[in-house]
Image (cartoon, rainbow, N blue to C red):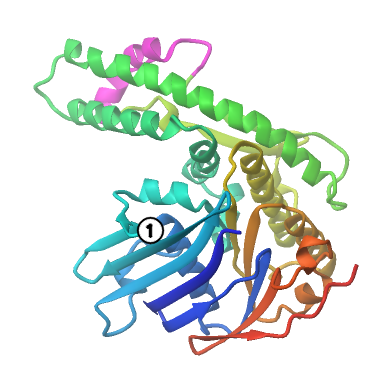
Amino acid sequence: MPITRLVVDDFRNLKSVEVRPGKDVSLIEGENGSGKTSLLEAIHTLGLGRSFRTRKFKNLISYHQPAFHIYCDFAQQGIPHRLGVTRGRDGTSLFKLDGEVINSAADLAALLPCQVIDSHSFQLLEGGPSERRAFVDWLVFHVKPNFRRVWSDYARCLKQRNSLLRSDRIQRPDFAIWDNALAKLGGEIDSYRREVVEAFESITRNYLKECDFIESGHFEMSYQAGWDTSKPLLEQLDAHFERDLALGYTSLGPHKSDVRFTFNKRPLVELFSRGQQKAVITAFYLAQLEAFLQNNPRDCVLLIDDLPAELDEQNVQRLCKWIGNLERVQSFMTGIDLSLINRIWPARVSSEEEGARKLFHVKHGQITEQPCHRSIP
């Protein structure tokens, strides 16, 4: 069980909150502006060092307070830990695990894998390539141990090459060392991504087969590397040098990759209603988590903001079944009224254990636990 106790101080309108979440799922209901999404933000900040709603951390600190503090007790592979995050208005930040300082947000992210589904998740279908790269790379980061180092080295080389491209005092031979490094590292990144996409695609098909609104046909997840892979990247960097020089940046490489989701050769975004898109997007995220669980021994936290929104009862029931069947995933769901989810949550042995499923009500930044009725088989 990832989180057994959560303490939040001076985070948005959560002044002083302590929650003991459900082992499998915590249902968090309340009116708009009550603070229920802020609780998800706090968990996300604990897991990644930042909010999923804003990059401006000062907006997260309660009015007239110097800093926010978030702590949790959690366990991974049966080993208990204490994790804490503090960020101040003066720009200071402190991440600590069991009393020891964590030096980077990447180190933090590896400890408590956390994924979020909210209104922004529609960008997976509607947004640009960067949204889809981030989605793929979340999984690559957690299942390919060397990816973090390789990507960091690639980003550093890319920054240096782009800087040289904007300089008028650098000769073509001076780029050789960076082109060679980018080509080598880019090939490794591409290999990691392809392995992950292949595994993810087959799992996704299994989820989509259960969606009765999807007619028979062929789902495809088309991965595009960011360059023509029929030719070596190094050769193409050389061939496109003059164009890159004119642009002032490197136009080819894994930083330009994309993933396209199609069904019967048509983009998914063109085929379904808003509610159906949400069901499909949720299937993508759950397939991602299933691939994670197959390749990483850690437990995972799933945050879902306003699950019932835009969904009919049939789709709500389908998604609850999917989520409830995921082992080693602790879910937190928000909504104005979660009585339907509380009633139809799928019954299984683990979900009916004492404290496995909990219901919380949020009002004016205060959180109280409510009676949680037993699921109907």
Quarter occupied by the C terminus: bottom right
Q: Position of residue 175 (x, y in %)?
A: 22, 16
Give above or below for 339 relative to 205: below
Magenta residues (range): 228-248
Out of 330 and 302, give the one closest to the viewer. Answer: 330
Residue at 54 percent across and 59 percent down: it is: 120
In magenta segment, residue 235: yes
Quarter occupied by the N terminus: bottom right
* Residue 11 visible here: no
Q: Position of residue 122 (x, y in %)?
A: 60, 55
Give above or below for 239 relative to 272: above
In magenta segment, residue 108: no
Out of 285 and 245, give the one closest to the viewer. Answer: 285
Out of 327 and 187, give the one closest to the viewer. Answer: 327
* Residue 160 visible here: yes
Residue at 58 percent across and 35 percent down: it is: 259
Q: Secondary structure at mark 1?
A: loop
Residue at 60 percent across and 32 percent down: it is: 196
Q: Position of residue 118 (x, y in %)?
A: 58, 62
- Displayed quadrant of residue 247: top left
- Classified by dominant secondary structure, the portion drawn in magenta counts as helix
Q: Residues within 10 Å of mark 1 (few under 14, many from 20)?
A: few
- Displayed quadrant of residue 341: bottom right
Give above or below for 221 relative to 178: below
Q: Which residue is mark 1?
A: 98
Q: Residue furthest bottom?
A: 364
Say which amino acid is labelled 1: Asp
Give above or below for 247 relative to 67: above
